[in-house]
Amino acid sequence: MSPEVIDRYVKAGRTVKEIRSRIVNLVREGRSFLDICEDIEETTREKGCEPAFPCNIGVNEVAAHYTASVDDQNVIPADSVVKLDLGAHVDGYVADSAVTVILNPEYEPMLIAAEEALDRALKIISPGTKIRDVSMTIQRTIAAYGYQPISNLCGHGIKLYIVHASPSIPNVASPFLYGKLESDNVYAIEPFVTTKDAAAVVVDGPCGNIYHLTKLKRPKDENCEKLFDRIYSAYRTLPFTTRWILKETSNEASRSLERLLERRHVEAYPVFYERTGKPVVQAEHSILLTEKDVILLT
C-alpha cells in the first residue's frame, strides 16, 4: 500500500473522527432524523471528503440500513437508543465508524459492553491475527456483561469504493471460522449488542432509502442511462440515497431509479431489525494494517 493511499485513508478517518466527537450534541429528543443525517453528510463534505454512504440512523431495535428520506418526518423519541453509522471517503478510500447515543440510562451498561468489546478486539489485532480470535474476544467480552452479540451482523473488510468487502469478521466465534487479518488491508471491527432475552439476530425489513449499483453495464434506456451515468460518476459502487438523487436530478430520477431497480442495475438495502424488537447498541472503528503498524483510522 503506497504512502499516497495511506494518506487518503488517514484523511477520511480523520474526518470521521472529528464528526464522531460532536455526535452526542447532535442527538436529542425531538430532533428530526433528516436534520441529523444531513448535518453529518454536509459536515463530511465541508471537511474535504465525501460521505462513503448515507448516514445510517438506527433507533432502538433498528440495527442498520435506515437513512432519512427526502421528506422524512421521524424524530428522535424519548428514552431511545440511537445508533449513527457514518463514513467518509477520499477517491474511494473509505473510513467507516459508528457511535451510539443512549437517552435511556437503563441501556448505558450495554453500550459500555459494546465499547469494551471493540477496544479489546482492537488491542489483539496485528497482521496475522486469526479472525476467530477477534470474534471470540468480542463474544466473551459482551457475554461477561450479561448481554448478547448479534450473531448475523459482522465486521468486514474495506476495499476501494467498497464499504463491505471480504472477509466477514463475526461477533460470534465458531470452530469453522477461518482466515487471518493481513497487512495492507483496511478492516472495520463492529460489535452489535442486544439484551439477554433477545433473539440476538436481525431480520430484513423494508427498504431504508439506501441503494448501490450492482450491474455496471450501462442500460439502453436513455433516461435510465443518464441516471446510471450520474450515479456511477458520483458514487461508483458506494451506497447512495434517494435524498441525494432527487436533489441532483429532476423528478424523472425517481421513475428512472425504479426502472434501474427492476432491471437489477441497482439494489436496495433492507433495514435490519432485531427479530424480537429488543434494542441494539453498536460500536465501530476502522483500522489499517501495514507490515509494521496498526493505524486506528477513526
Image (spheres, grey):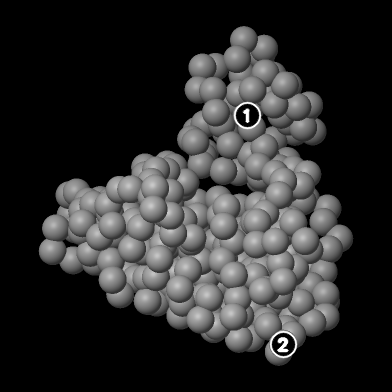
Disc on the earlier residue, 1 or 2: 2
Left or right of 11? Residue 266 is right
Q: Where residue 285 sits in the image (x, y, percent)?
A: 43, 67
Q: Quadrant of residue 150?
A: bottom right
Is residue 9 visible from the viewing direction of this image? no
Residue at (57, 57) in percent of width and height:
151
From what the image shows, is residue 217 above or below residue 144? above
| Badge 1: residue crowd in 10 Å (few <14, some 14–19, many ≥20) | many
Q: Which residue is mark 2?
A: 106
Q: Residue furthest bottom?
A: 105
Quadrant into which the C terminus falls: bottom left
Left or right of 5? Residue 206 is right
From what the image shows, is residue 220 above or below residue 286? above
Q: Which residue is mark 1?
A: 266
Q: Amino acid at mark 1?
A: Val
Q: Where residue 252 sits in the image (x, y, percent)?
A: 77, 28
Left or right of 293? Residue 79 is right
Most foreground residue, 61 or 136: 136
Q: Residue furthest front?
A: 175
Q: Quadrant of residue 99?
A: bottom right
Q: Amino acid at mark 2?
A: Glu
Q: Residue furthest right?
A: 73
For mark 2, give the secondary structure.
helix
Is residue 132 visible from the viewing direction of this image? yes
Q: Where residue 230 sits in the image (x, y, percent)?
A: 57, 31
- In space, the residues marked 1 and 2 are separated at their CA atoms by 40 Å
Left or right of 272? Residue 43 is left
Q: Residue furthest top?
A: 220
From what the image shows, is residue 101 above or below residue 68? below
Most foreground residue, 178 or 7: 178
